[in-house]
Image: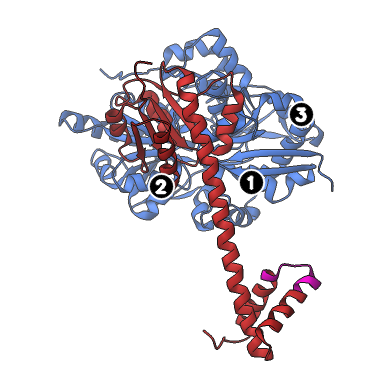
Chain colours: A blue, B red
């Protein structure tokens, strides 16, 4: 079959690049007439730079990263749009054994409950502050990441001021477990398998997971150079179809063995299949012999996981405002609103006759149970999608949401 | 120019490449050059060095950490931003192609930085060329070793002279349209599978 489209894409060696990797390796891209070339990168900064100068047409990106590019928060960034999400969930918060013991002394239990764990962590932090000890140091992978925003959201909702009561530093995902073991950091928020890595090494304990902080919440996306997307609408539509088929394949447990084998190759994730099982099954070893299975821990396809909800982008925007990354102005809000492109997702997938959400945004946290929703074509199930603290994010009430956010210690 | 010498910090885990960059900078008259291979404790080093220009290789997995630190760390007294001269897209492309990036302190004029970046780009390219040639030389040496072993097997098993053994390998390679080293490797592998080699 002759290839009608040449597409070059960058990715980071993380499990949630799986849908993009499988599109190339299992043949979904070729079936759509795409010659898809993947390049493994070593930093998000490299991905940004190579998109900007045209080495890559698109890339595996952190959900807030295209927003940061378009809002002018990063150097050498080109206008980037998001026509596809690579999945929901997949992250955890891990803490060192010593501080886990401290949390247990303050009521934490190995049940991943965000509120209970947060209360225990707060008590521990206050106890240390009273004794004049150094604040705990947490690591995330990038300032403009779901990890940074969900960690801060969790802490703030538990009455901990993440800007003053702890320190937050940046560490590349593969170095997290080593940094924790060496005592350079006390805890971190990162995607799998880098949490299970610390548990397996006997140096860390998983305290909570993204799927419990905000169930069915956005993580990585496909960021596309806007100029390329506008000049190559057919190539983009073909790619979206390839990614759709790939995502469906990745979700199916029958394919997990093959997927893990593909990801285990040195050119991709480069880690043994066994290490990838927690993210595929949602069954986590928390440390100290505790084990727990999390519903919807990571969804590469189900629950409309690939739909680029504008409400996801807008929630990231509210957190960028909250933590001082960007000013809340009508212009910035408009940029954030235009970044995720459900219209392109729909037009690319329409020929397939699959379920497509009718709305561009949804009220996040409104679905308390799995709910069939009206959509074009076949049936679609969304949710539950609640925030752990019961908050609702209505994208039509952004001003009120931003005004109501606590960005500092509030229990005084 | 009143202050002629810029403080330049080179962050590169590759020691050989870093020393090539350092030599180039010194040749160009930059005396205040510091090279760091390991980013552990780098915030303190930056506070001590107070660099005007920081050169980083793009393979460095700590780039995201470093970029964040340049903006936020209390140790970094002056804001440091990535060197981006919008009017000179070609030089940015050349830098990314070469695998290097430069960061400069706030307020430093672009024309003072560009020669440093250009120098780093050309040295990075020279290093890649050197590494490539080295790799070619290494694989050349490897194939010669394999061919020697294959010749030895043929000489022993078929009683051929060294020259006849080589001719047989060369003929087979030509007939199969493959490289001599590939044929030799197949022979060595097959011999290994069929029985222990006496010469080992």
According to the picture, the residue beneath numbered tag 3 turns out to be: A232
In the image, residue B77 sits, relative to residue A262, either above or below, namely: above
Mark 1 residue crowding within 10 angstroms, few (<14) / some (14–19) / many (20+): many
**The disc label shown at residue B15, or none:** 2
**The C terminus of chain A sits in image quarter:** top left
Q: Counting other residues with Cα less than 10 Å from the Cα at mark 2, is it few (<14), some (14-19), or many (20 or more)?
A: few
Pick whichever, B134 or B10, lies toward us: B134
Q: Are marks 3 and 2 in contact (CB under 8 Å)?
A: no
| Whether residue A362 is visible | no
Residue B10 image point, x, y percent: 40, 36
Q: Identify the residue position indicated by label 1 in the image.
A: A21
Task: Report the disc number at residue B28.
Answer: none
Magenta span: B172-181
In terms of image quadrants, where is residue A127? top left
Q: CA distance from mark 3 to mark 2?
A: 43 Å
User: Spatial distance from mark 3 to mark 1, Cα to Cα?
Assistant: 21 Å
Distance CA(mark 2)–CA(mark 1): 33 Å
Disc 2 is attached to a residue of which chain? Answer: B
The residue closer to the viewer here, B173 or B32, is B32
């Amino acid at each position: 079959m002759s290839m009608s489209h040449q597409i070059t894409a960058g990715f980071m060696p993380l499990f949630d690049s799986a849908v993009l990797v499988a599109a190339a390796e299992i043949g979904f891209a070729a079936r759509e007439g795409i010659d898809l070339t993947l390049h493994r990168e070593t930093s998000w900064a490299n991905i940004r730079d190579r998109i900007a100068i045209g080495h890559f047409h698109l890339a595996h990106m952190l959900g807030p990263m295209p927003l940061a590019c378009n809002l002018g928060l990063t150097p050498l960034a080109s206008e980037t749009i998001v026509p596809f999400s690579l999945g929901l969930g997949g992250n955890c918060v891990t803490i060192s054994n010593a501080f886990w013991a401290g949390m247990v002394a303050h009521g934490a239990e190995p049940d991943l409950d965000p509120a209970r764990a947060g209360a225990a962590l707060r008590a521990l932090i206050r106890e240390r502050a009273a004794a004049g000890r150094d604040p705990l140091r947490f690591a995330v992978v990038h300032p403009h990441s779901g990890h940074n925003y969900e960690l801060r959201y969790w802490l703030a909702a538990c009455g901990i001021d993440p800007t003053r009561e702890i320190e937050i530093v940046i560490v590349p995902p593969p170095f997290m477990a080593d940094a924790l073991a060496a005592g350079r950091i006390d805890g971190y928020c990162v995607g799998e398998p880098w949490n299970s890595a610390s548990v397996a090494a006997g140096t860390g304990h998983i305290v909570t997971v993204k799927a419990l902080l905000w169930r069915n919440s956005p993580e990585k996306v496909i960021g596309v150079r806007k100029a390329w997307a506008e000049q190559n609408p057919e190539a983009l539509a073909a790619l979206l179809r390839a990614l759709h088929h790939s995502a469906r394949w990745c979700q199916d447990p029958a394919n997990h063995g093959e997927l893990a084998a593909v990801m285990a190759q040195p050119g991709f994730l480069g880690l043994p299949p066994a290490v990838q099982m927690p993210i595929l099954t949602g069954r986590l070893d928390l440390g100290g012999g505790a084990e727990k299975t999390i519903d919807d821990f990571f969804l590469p396809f189900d629950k409309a996981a690939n739909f680029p909800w504008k409400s996801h982008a807008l929630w990231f925007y509210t957190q960028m405002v909250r933590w001082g990354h960007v000013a809340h102005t009508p212009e910035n809000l408009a940029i954030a609103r235009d970044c995720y492109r459900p219209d392109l997702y729909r037009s690319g997938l329409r020929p397939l006759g699959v379920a497509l959400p009718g709305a561009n945004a949804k009220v996040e946290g409104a679905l308390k149970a799995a709910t069939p929703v009206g959509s074009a074509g076949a049936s679609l199930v969304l949710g539950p999608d609640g925030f752990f603290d019961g908050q609702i994010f209505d994208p039509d009430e952004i001003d009120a949401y931003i005004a109501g956010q606590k960005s500092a210690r509030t229990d005084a | 120019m009143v202050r002629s010498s810029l403080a330049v910090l080179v962050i590169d885990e590759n020691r050989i490449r870093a020393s090539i960059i350092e030599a180039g900078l010194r040749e160009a008259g930059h005396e205040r050059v510091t090279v760091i291979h390991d980013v552990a404790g780098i915030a303190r080093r930056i506070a001590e060095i107070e660099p005007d220009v920081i050169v980083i290789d793009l393979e460095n997995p700590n780039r995201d950490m470093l970029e964040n630190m340049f903006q936020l760390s209390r140790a970094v007294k002056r804001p440091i931003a990535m060197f981006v001269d919008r009017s000179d897209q070609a030089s940015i492309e050349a830098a990314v192609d070469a695998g290097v990036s430069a960061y400069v302190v706030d307020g430093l004029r672009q024309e003072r930085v560009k020669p440093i970046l250009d120098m780093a780009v050309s040295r990075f390219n020279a290093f890649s060329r050197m590494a490539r040639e080295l790799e070619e030389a290494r694989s050349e040496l490897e194939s010669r070793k394999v061919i020697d072993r294959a010749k030895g097997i043929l000489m022993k098993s078929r009683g051929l002279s060294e020259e006849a053994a080589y001719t047989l390998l060369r003929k087979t390679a030509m007939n199969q349209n493959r490289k001599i080293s590939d044929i030799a490797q197949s022979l060595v592998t097959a011999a290994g599978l069929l029985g222990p080699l006496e010469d080992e």
